[in-house]
Image (cartoon, helix red, strand yellow):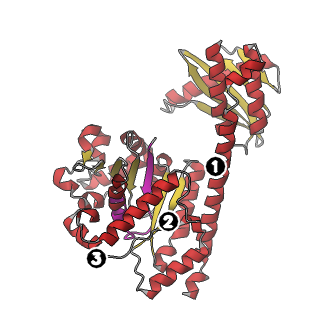
Amino acid sequence: MGKIVAVASQKGGVGKTTTCLNLAVSLTGLGKKVLLVDCDPQGALAAASNLKRITDKGLVQLLTGELQEEDVVIPAGKRSLALVGSGVLETEDIFFLEQQAVSGNLGKAIRALSVGYDYTLLDTQAGLSRGLFQLFSDVDSVLLPCTCKATTVKTLPLFLKFIQQARQSENHRLKLEGVVLTMYNESDPCAVEVSETIQDAFPQEIFFRTSIPLLLSFEQASLRAVPVALLKRDTLAVQAYDKLAFELVARQKGGEGRNE
Amino acid sequence: MNRLKKSKELLEAASIFNALLVQEQDDMAKQQQVAKAELTTADNVAENQPFRGDQLENVLYGMCQRGGFQGAAVADEQGLALAIYNSPVEGDVLAAFTTVLGEAIGKAGRFLEQHDANNISLDINFIDKAVVRQFSLGDNSFYILVICGQEIDERSEIELSIKQVTAILEKH
């Protein structure tokens, strides 16, 4: 059975969408079948992947019954990757999607869509909401991207309490997949110090060994609305997500990828 | 940076990370325990107990021992007891009560639009609870009832035992 992983964080701008997209591409490189779902009404994933060129329909139209599953799941080229957009076109669609998340319909729809995929990655909206809380009842784990900034670190307790609460009341099987440090700039002494501080303070097995470096190529890929792997310029960026994908798969196979 | 190191947020996050990890490890241990118990298949039970009622009682006994439950029963839709272990009241009464709760699952499903509801939990005062899980075999519905403390998470043991009960009922 496949695994549904929510890429989530209370703080915005930590690289959720970039992680979702590039991790998905790297997972396909390991032979995995991956579904990417844009649960963020902002539609950042659709924008970052050029999905909007093909369709602007997605979850909203699926949940209203206007479209069927096969109409909203868009295969990405020859890769074993498919995407589902949020389908948010109007302001009321935002409220509709949140309401569907709160009622549990969004989670059920995602579970149905995820059948046949090894991994379903959910790009979620920044922040904490009742909808996200309910969505956690239908996911297997939460992957938490975290930048090495004090402001991000300080949002962690509330987000972790949120996961803990969801685990206790909604989904006893909900796992914290791990924390991945993103936009890590090793020439920035502040980032290095924050990284060392949190790695000292938090249990080691929480962290993925791989951190995602701060590289220009992510911005360039974003400008072209493609995953960084398609730029073929920056092997460092591609390698980082390949390693992360490998660790994610290894963790599922029995925890050997845990940072012990 | 010292400020971050000593900040309340960092310490709090560390403590929650630890709690989440401990919870995950506990759950993993529990799953392993369940998997181990699953090895006690209905076939093994059948070897030692020739009669269906005895086999079912054996399953209930094992479930109560592992889960720390006080008692348990299996009943059919008509309220007929198929097996009872350590009933606090007359066995037939417990079986009838099991079916009453079982019917309440169906009603909850209709009234609350929870059409896939298959279990119900009744808290008795602040100490015990009676949990009924409905399961089907062919066209027939059956109920398994467990009486245990409210602090006990009974789900995994019930799910495991349903597999065993179903296997026994299929054989007979």
Quarter of the picture containing the C terminus of chain B is top right
Q: Is residue A83 left or right of residue B40?
A: left
Dots 3, 2 in contact, CB < 8 A = no
Q: Amino acid at mark 3?
A: Leu
Please provide the residue range marked out in magenta: A2-21
Please, what is the three-letter code of the amino acid marked with disc 2? Answer: Phe
Would residue B23 be counted in the magenta stretch? no
Q: Which mark is residue B61?
A: none
Q: Chain of mark 1?
A: B
Asked if the residue under mark 3 is in contact with the one under mark 1, i.e. CB atoms within 8 Å, the reply is no
* A7 is within the stretch colored magenta: yes
- Which mark is drawn over residue B28? 1
| Residue occupying the point 83% across, 27% down | B88
- Mark 3 closeness class: few <14, some 14–19, many ≥20 residues within 10 Å: few
Residue A84 located left or right of residue A157: left
Relative to B32, is A165 on the left or the right?
Answer: left
Q: Which residue is mark 3?
A: A216
Disc 2 target residue = A208
Percent position (x, y) of residue A117?
Answer: 38, 43
Q: Judge by depth and name the residue closer to the eye, B115 or A145.
A: A145
Mark 2, chain letter?
Answer: A
Tell me residue B35's x, y (percent).
65, 38
Q: Quadrant of residue B39?
A: top right
Label 1: state its secondary structure: helix
Q: CA distance from mark 2 to mark 1?
A: 20 Å
**Disc 3, SS:** helix
Query: Does any portion of residue B72 appear in the rendered image?
Result: no
Residue A102 percent location from the top left of the image: 44, 48
Do badges 3 and 2 share one subunit? yes
> Label 1 sits on what residue type?
Met
Residue B115 in the image, given as x and y percentages of width and height: 48, 29
From the viewer's perspective, tell me whether residue A52 is left or right of residue A236: left
